[in-house]
Image (tube, rainbow, N blue to C red):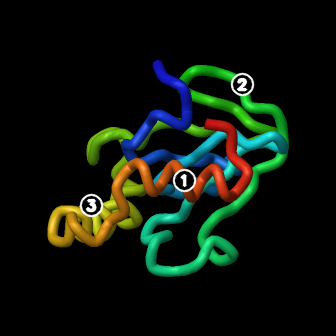
Amino acid sequence: MAALETVTAPLVIRFSADTEKVVARAFPHPEGVVYLDLFWHHSGPAETAHLIPGVLHGEGPWRVGTARIRVLGCASTDPYLQQQYIPWRDYLNQYPREYPPEEQIREIAIRLGCRI
């Protein structure tokens, strides 16, 4: 598929058999993977950037530690995750100029220690 840091589509992180979370972005980090929550740009990195420790494997889906990361499917594929995703999608459609450009997102990831 692609290198994780190049994927701008919403991602799903499966932490365990019963815990999945939709996230905005994810980047390789020397200690694992750093992911950004939906609406991450409304708060600081301490609240919205999280490290999953482990070694990153794969080209989509990806694995790190015991977590699995994949691109969010459509409403038919991932109906139970749409409640998390739809407010994010609607926000991005309504306020596209409020979301940081890709270059700025990558700079933030680099400041967080990510490998890009």
Residue at screen point 40% across, 56% down: 80
Q: Are marks 2 and 1 in contact (CB under 8 Å)?
A: no
Q: Which residue is mark 2?
A: 57
Query: Which quadrant of the figure has residue 36?
Result: bottom right
Structural distance between the alpha carbons of marks 3 and 2: 28 Å
Q: Nearer the viewer, residue 103 or 21?
A: 103
Q: Nearer the viewer, residue 87 or 7?
A: 7
Where in the figure is residue 106, as x and y percent of width and height? 51, 49
Residue at screen point 81% across, 40% down: 30
Q: Which residue is mark 1?
A: 107
Q: Are marks 3 and 2 in contact (CB under 8 Å)?
A: no
Camera sees residue 16: no
Mark 2 residue type: His
At mark 2, the secondary structure is strand
Q: Residues within 10 Å of mark 1 (few under 14, many from 20)?
A: few
Nearest to N terminus: mark 2 or mark 1: 2
Structural distance between the alpha carbons of marks 2 and 1: 23 Å
Residue at screen point 60% across, 53% down: 109
Where in the figure is residue 92, as x and y percent of width and height? 25, 64
At mark 1, the secondary structure is helix
Q: Residues within 10 Å of mark 2 (few under 14, many from 20)?
A: some
Q: Nearer the viewer, residue 28 or 80?
A: 28
Mark 1 residue type: Glu
Nearest to N terminus: mark 3 or mark 2: 2
